[in-house]
Amino acid sequence: MRKVTPRRENLDFAFYFLGVVYLALGLVMLGLEALSLLLRETPWGFLVGSVLGIGLGLLFRRLGDARSEPSRAEALFSLALIWLLVPLLGAVPFWVSGGMPFLDALFEAMSGFTTTGATVLADFGAWGYGLFLWRSLIQWFGGVGILVLLAAVLSHLAIAGRQLFMAESTGVQKEPFTPRLRVAAQSVLKVYVALTVACAVCYALAGMPWFEAVCNALTTLPAAGFSPNPQSFAAYSPLAQWFGTLFMFLAGTNFVLQFQLFLRREPLPLLRNVEFRVYTLVVLAFGFGLAAFLMTHHQQDMNYSWSEALRHAFFNVTSLITTTGYASADFALWAPAAQAILVLAMFVGGCSGSGAGGIKVIRWLVIGALARRELLRALQPQAVLTLRVGSKALSEDVMRSVAGFITLYVVLFGVSTVALTLLENDYVLGLTASAQAIGNVGPGLGEIGPMGSFANLQPLSKIILIFEMWAGRIELIPVFLLLTPELWRRLRS
């Protein structure tokens, strides 16, 4: 029997795109190498990383082809491969200069590029400006990268229900893949950069030191959550926390609709968007509900005034709904019922086309519409009921895609929760660690709370969480497809 080998041209897109990303990261690390030398900090991590990034980037670009139009199998394989290999390069500075074991460095880098915000860093005083800036930049790059790739790839391929909520907002659903990528990148980048600059200025005006203002802005807009301050936003002024709430809310809003609002002066597409309206209502409901609870149920001698309760409630609710992961207070010390509200918020997610992770509001709307239809069908079995979200009728393809995504999400969350609970002998830690990782949220409860660290977890626990962060960021389907023989057969054909 003739041996079947992979055709190289089927991987042209993956190689070329990975080469471009590696080259870009290598050049960024070269700049940070110069900064580290100027500040007399340990430069070797950035030097090694830049050599690897530029060298491998040139190699991969040569193996690839910029003119390649990827097949479905190649596009999905590329997503999974890129989001796995890029953190391996990003981990080098943390490993060489940061003094971390390689597994911890990979955990930190995967958390950064997937915009999760979970950290294994315990001693913030051990790092200099260069490493903290790199830590923030990888989240900023990860945020814009996932926005462009998910908007252009998964919606183009009708994966995980994205054809429902991305095609109309981008307006390029009929175009080939490569022009689609350029259009999506241009519109997203303009808003992303403008809001990042505005966020940094607002933080600085609110009294935040300029370096911390820049680092926090770089991790706010991708809904990421790494802060150079070990106390997160609890270390900053109330005004800075309100600014954080505002920009986190924007980070969880569709960037293409924000492009139409801010740059085209067209507010109606955003205001008419049913997902945005529900997202806003959910944030308000969770925020006022938690504020009322904090006013009536005091814990650990934290007697909040009404204004303080509102500020902490809306900051932390917005942070977890958008999967940013900042904290204005150590909510691991709050009453269990208040923590339960925040854990529930982890499963909401922001809007489609945003930097937020999680399930996303639009998918909850689809599930709600499906549940309502089945209840009505119990009363009228013969009725023909059209499934709708807002004014849009849903196809069976969309329902199947969303149902498949939710099923994989629940299965991975459940299995990981059990595994982490057994490994760490702590159910609360296992449940919240799994929820934050698959949803790319950041903090959990207990020792992995907002002021804590993942450093003391078992090595196998960290590997499970790395897998969850990776799978959750690219919305599960590409990762699970790697386990199917059919994908590998298509790549070889």
Image (cartoon, grey):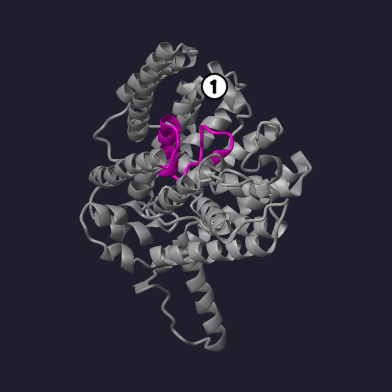
Q: Which percent across, then down, holds residue 157? A: 36, 52
Residue where numbered disc 1 is placed: 127
Q: Which range of residues does the magenta coloring cover?
A: 206-232
Front residue (pair 273, 449): 449
- Asked if the stretch drawn in magenta spans residue 489, the answer is no
In this view, 396 is above or below 155 = below
- Image side of residue 382 versus residue 69, left or right: right
Image quadrant in which you'd find residue 345: bottom right
Task: Give SS at disc 1.
Answer: loop
Q: Is residue 471 visible?
A: yes
Front residue (pair 71, 463): 463
Give the residue at the far left of this rendering: 264
Q: Residue at x 53, y 83 (%)?
A: 377
Q: Residue at x 26, y 62 (%)?
A: 267
Query: Where is the C terminus found, in terms of image quarters?
Result: top left
Q: Which percent across, then down, holds residue 74? A: 38, 40
Q: Which percent across, then down, holds residue 52? A: 42, 17
Q: Which percent across, then down, holds residue 243? A: 43, 48
Q: Amino acid at mark 1?
A: Trp
- Mark 1, Cα crowd under 10 Å, few <14 / some 14-19 / many 20+, is some
- Asked if the stretch drawn in magenta spans residue 210, the answer is yes
